[in-house]
Amino acid sequence: MNFHVLTLFPDMIVQGLNTSVTGRALTQGYIHLNAVDIRAYSTDKHRHVDDYPYGGGAGMVMQPDPIYRAYMDVIKDMQASPRVIYVTPQGKVFRQSMAEEFAREEDLVFLCGHYEGVDERILEEIVTDYVSIGDYVLTGGELAAMVMIDAVSRLIPGVLNNEESAEFESFHDNLLEYPHYTRPVEYHGKRVPDVLLSGHHKNIDKWRREQSLERTLLRRPDLLTDASLTKEDLIYLYRLGYRPSGEEDVQEKL
């Protein structure tokens, strides 16, 4: 997987991703990072990449030409046009399913905006996906791009040491992850659940599934609408008070 980030702050991208899991994945060659300095493609002697907005208003707007030049340099050796992700609060909210979709690409290009935004014409010309990491505004797109790159990277084969850990963590089947415990068996008067000490893997799997269902219902009930639920899951949720669209609908499924 090749990540290309068009940014005014390439050092921020490189330093942020060259640590922990993504840093190891870069070193081992499972992923590749190309942080592209948009300023390097400015034709202005002062390397300006922004100007005042037409129509007036506060702030500055990123000019289209430096971005276009940077983009064309990135794709010059590609066999096909890549997906270009513009990180913006106006985009679709980034979810695990989107990370899984992006992980199937060979190249991903992220465009990081700054100031009051980016000239609309370059967005219309190169952007394929408008994506947000939440309903709030950041000073630039770099942090959002790194969040998405981190989420996508962990789905690339070989990036995680344990291949199962990417599959059975939060948002698997659109459910939150079950709670984890390690030594000691008792801490501050609280014991590890007995089922986890039993060695009975079928009972452990059942307990973990029920904990995921219960935690999702309590903390993120909105996720249950699109979750992959079995009949046993629905029965358990029904006992916990889950009523997605009325009691009769649930009873029909049961």
Image (cartoon, rainbow, N blue to C red):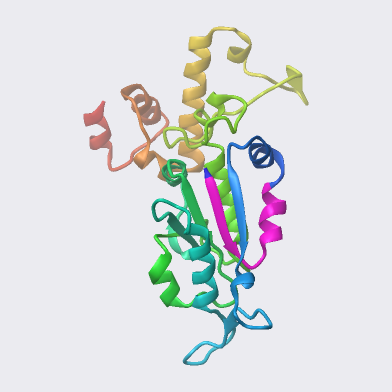
Q: For the point 58% across and 51% down, which residue is it? A: 147
Magenta extent: 2-17
Question: Could you tell me residue 166's position as x and y percent?
Answer: 53, 31
Which image quadrant: the C terminus? top left
User: Is residue 109 or residue 218 the one in the foreground?
Assistant: 109
Q: Is residue 105 above or below residue 170?
A: below
Would residue 223 appear left or right of 208 to someone viewing this image? left
Q: Is residue 183 above or below residue 172?
A: above
Would residue 83 appear left or right of 67 to someone viewing this image? left
Q: Is residue 204 above or below residue 149?
A: above
> Is 153 included in the stretch rendered in magenta?
no
User: Is residue 31 or residue 144 the one in the foreground?
Assistant: 31
Q: Quadrant of residue 225?
A: top left
Q: Quadrant of residue 248?
A: top left
Q: Is residue 55 above or below residue 188?
A: below
Question: Could you tell me residue 113's position as x and y percent?
Answer: 56, 69
Residue ranking furthest to the front: 77
Question: Could you tell me residue 35's position as x and y percent?
Answer: 62, 57
